Image (cartoon, helix red, strand yellow):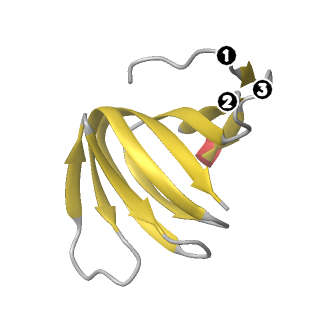
Amino acid sequence: MSEFTNVTVSKEANVYFDGQVTSRTIILADGSRKTLGVMLPGDYEFGTEVKELMEITSGQLDVLLPGASEWQAFTGDMSFEVPANAKFGVKVQQVTNYVCSYFA
């Protein structure tokens, strides 16, 4: 899906790592929440509160998933899941756009 329709968009951006990672929250008609974001090259660690699905729409990054010992490469049209209450590492190789879906 290349676009979302019938959504509510938060006016305020979510800004992380001194502006290196930014996103906007959208609420879909069914009440589900997603963020649409951009990550600039760099190394980051994120934490989850609920299960997340990260869909990479463009760019290139390496991800160290919880419990994994090896980094995995992801590019556009790839995705990965992260369980609730977990941390994961990201090494962004080139500007990366993503959609994050949250599951309660």
Circle 2: residue type: Leu
Q: Which mark is residue 28?
A: 2
Q: Quadrant of residue 7?
A: top right
Image coordinates of residue 68 in percent, x first then y, are 30, 80
Q: Secondary structure at mark 2?
A: loop
- Residue 48, percent from left and from top: 60, 65
For the N terminus, the quadrant is: top left
Structural distance between the alpha carbons of marks 3 and 1: 13 Å
Task: Name the residue carrying label 1.
Answer: 6
Residue 22 percent location from the top left of the image: 59, 34
Residue drawn at the location 64% of the way across and 45% of the way down: 16
Of the residues shown, which amino acid type is indicated by label 1? Asn
Q: Is residue 4 left or right of residue 15?
A: left
Quadrant in the rendering for residue 90:
bottom left
Q: Is residue 52 visible?
A: yes
Residue highlighted by disc 3: 10
Q: Are marks 3 and 1 in contact (CB under 8 Å)?
A: no
From the top left corner, tell me how far across and down residue 93 is, in percent.
26, 43
Which label lies toward us, 3 or 1? 1
